Amino acid sequence: MDGIIWFFQNIALAFYNFGYALTHPGLWLDWSNKEALMRFIYYGGSVEFFFVVFTAFLVFTAIGIWRNSFMWGCVRVMEGMANGIGRLAAWAGLLMVLQQIIIVFMQRIFSASEISFGFGKALTFDVSWWSEELKLYNALVVTLCCTYTFVQGGHVRVDLVYSAVSHRTKRIIDMIGSMIFMAPVALITWMYGWYFLWRHLVVPNPSASDTLDRLLQKSRALRWNVETIGFSPNGFNAYFLFKILLVTFAALVFLQAIAFFWRSYLEWVEGEESAGKYLDKDKLGDEDAELVAEIH
């Protein structure tokens, strides 16, 4: 009984917490104030933040059930965001290839130990730095294109049961999968990644077990300590960017789980004729390739 009361109390408090955060941005966005930065770190992985997001999901879902057009609008915005970010990040694959070609030419043909990029003030690093930095492009593609690939239906899956059931049963499976598997995994990844990120940006290190009062006490000694340690003496030294990408990945997957739940619900309600409604899928320009993509 206490757990049920706690649950509904936090839903009720979510409206107050959200309003208070909007009306007092300086308490958590003014990073020149050490206490404000610690509040931002705390609330980013807090129960309060979770219930603000969860309550927003409940409110938007309730409105969407009442007005399906509103829910379709939310789906189109969230899928459009996934497509836009993914299509932009996909260019990192081309940059990775071009940079690798330059590295090979400069190192093997011209025996250069350093490479400079830029106009005016050039960015100069050791060849090993540029070589290790290629991993960042790979991380950009993996983390930022994941939800884009999901919207496009490009992820590998086994359809032994799914392909044999009716349209409405498929949508029920999709709704259950998005809420039972996709969203919780994204939430766990966020919680791990959030504190993992900040432990490589500031000291004293924040912990998920720290209370707000404890973090505010730590803020007296707070200072930036951005990770700049590489795997080799002259190698890539901005590995904190990978932690930022991990958190971004978790947020995008969580939002896509919500969008997929709403789409599945709407297609369940409206019937088979609404399957793929408003879905912005890429045109491959090859009929055979598009047929294979449709099958998978």
Image: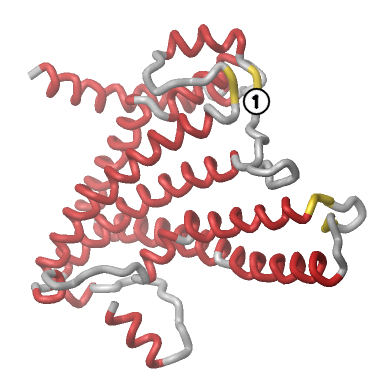
Which quarter of the figure has residue 130? Answer: bottom right
Residue that appears at 42% across and 58% down: 77
Relative to residue 149, is residue 27 drawn left or right?
right
Q: Amino acid at mark 1?
A: Asn
Q: Position of residue 117 (x, y in %)?
A: 82, 58
Render colour scheme: secondary structure
Residue that appears at 75% across and 69% down: 104
Q: Which residue is mark 1?
A: 225
Query: Quick one: label 1, few (<14), some, or many (20+) residues within 10 Å?
Result: some
Relative to residue 295, is residue 133 drawn left or right?
right
Above or below for 194 versus 127:
above
Residue that appears at 82% across and 66% down: 106
Q: Position of residue 177 (x, y in %)?
A: 20, 55
Nearer to the camera, 48 or 189? 189
Above or below for 224 versus 58:
above
Nearer to the camera, 3 or 268? 3
